[in-house]
Image (cartoon, rainbow, N blue to C red):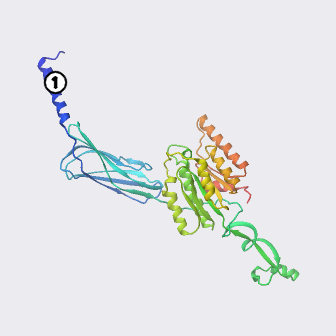
Amino acid sequence: MALTVPTVLLLSVVGVTYAAYARQASPPTVALTVERELSDPDPNPEDEVEVTVTVRNDGDETLPDLRLIDGVPPGLAVESGSPRLGTALRPGRKATFSYTVVARRGEHEFGPLQAVARDASGAAEREVAVEAPGTLSCVPPLEATDTVPLYGTATRYAGRVSTSSGGEGVEFHATREYRPGDPPNRIDWNRHARTRELATLLFREERAATVVLLVDVRKQAYGAPGPDAPNAVERSVTAAGQVFESLLAGGDRVGIASFGPRDCWLAPGAGSSHRERARRLLSTHEAFSAVPPETEFLPSARLADVRRRAPIDAQIVLLSPVTDDYVGTVARRLQAHGHPVTVLSPDVTTDGDPARRLVRVERRFRLNALREYDIRVVDWAADEDLTVALQRASQGWSP
């Protein structure tokens, strides 16, 4: 159908008028106050936390088209609701929205709220970031598990590792000729009754071990068996906390280190204050973040750092999924330099397609190669309790 001349003229006038309005329109002035409330600012892992955001228009004009996006920390997943809201807001009025996140280990800083305000026509807009500081702190307590059986080396501190030296202890070691001053409860009275000779009982001394828990936090270590499963670094950090608590409770001196671009080092120590430092470090240090690092690093330099820092008598518990060959290099070099190594490896491989099965087979080859080098290995399945994995792996280990 053909348009008449007056109709064409009218459409032209409307188009010109709208174009002129768009050029003259100015974005609205935005003055917002944001309040964010957490139902539990200090939750345990996997707890659901409701986040309630309230936005007030402190300006003098109505915001007819206001889009809001809250600054959810990258380490938290939104379980329900939405961190977004579209609304209109008159001066002095408030808008509230809420959503639920699942708590994960660490200190999670909320970012600024992003606001986009458009005029009534949508022709002009203004975008602002409104600061609204907030932190969700998930620092779980350390829970003990079965202790990793340690090699028979020891320090001068009393502890639980049996040595080849006789002295004070609970396990019988040998007897020697009685010496004046030996305590009566150490005399072998049974022998005296038979032979009328005095002899002194010696027991196997127990000394404290020095252990460094070395967590693989390279980008390669962040694999997971499925999209909703915890990645290997998360499992390794959890296991490190459990092993740390068990060793510390047993009288050993324990430290923590990272192997990756983010450096972390806690020298071996003991005591309640050392336990608290380790608890916060495992939960909040950026090296143990649930998000993979983006920066690159020189692995050989980091390995040299570990060797330089580790006490000469330290054992190493290396926590890694062992999904590449370099982990074996780390373990072998540490062992060759006098540090007995135990590899605790969370398995992230699956029996899916042929490519995934190949990854699983390659990992098994790597673990077997470590065993052939006399390195202890704990192969920890995704659906297996850590205590069960430790007990199964330690069967047949020599002291």
Dot 1 lies on which element?
A: helix
276 left or right of 9? right
Measuring 25% from the left and 40% from the top, which residue is drawn there? 125
Task: Please tell me in which quadrant of the rendered image residue 143 appears.
Answer: bottom right
Quickly name the residue at label 1: 12
Q: Residue at x 19, y 46 (%)?
A: 62
Residue 19 visible, this orientation:
yes
User: Whole-percent x and y of residue 108?
Assistant: 43, 54
Q: Nearer the viewer, residue 27 or 307?
A: 307
Q: How many marks?
A: 1
What is the residue that sits farthest to the left in this orientation?
6
Figure quadrant of the N terminus: top left
**Relative to 116, 43 lies left or right:** right
Residue 24 in the image: state x and y as whole percent: 18, 36
Q: Nearer the viewer, residue 247 or 329?
A: 329
Query: Quick one: quadrant of the C terminus?
Result: bottom right
Among the 4 quarters of the image, the one containing residue 258: bottom right
Quadrant for residue 314, please give it: bottom right
Q: Residue at x 37, y 54 (%)?
A: 50
Instruction: Give above or below for 16 relative to 227.
Output: above
- Whether residue 346 is visible, yes or no, is no
In percent of width and height, residue 164 lies at 76, 67
Q: Residue 82 at x, y = what percent?
A: 35, 46
Q: Residue furthest right?
A: 195
Report the amino acid beneath label 1: Ser
Q: Residues within 10 Å of mark 1 (few under 14, many from 20)?
A: few
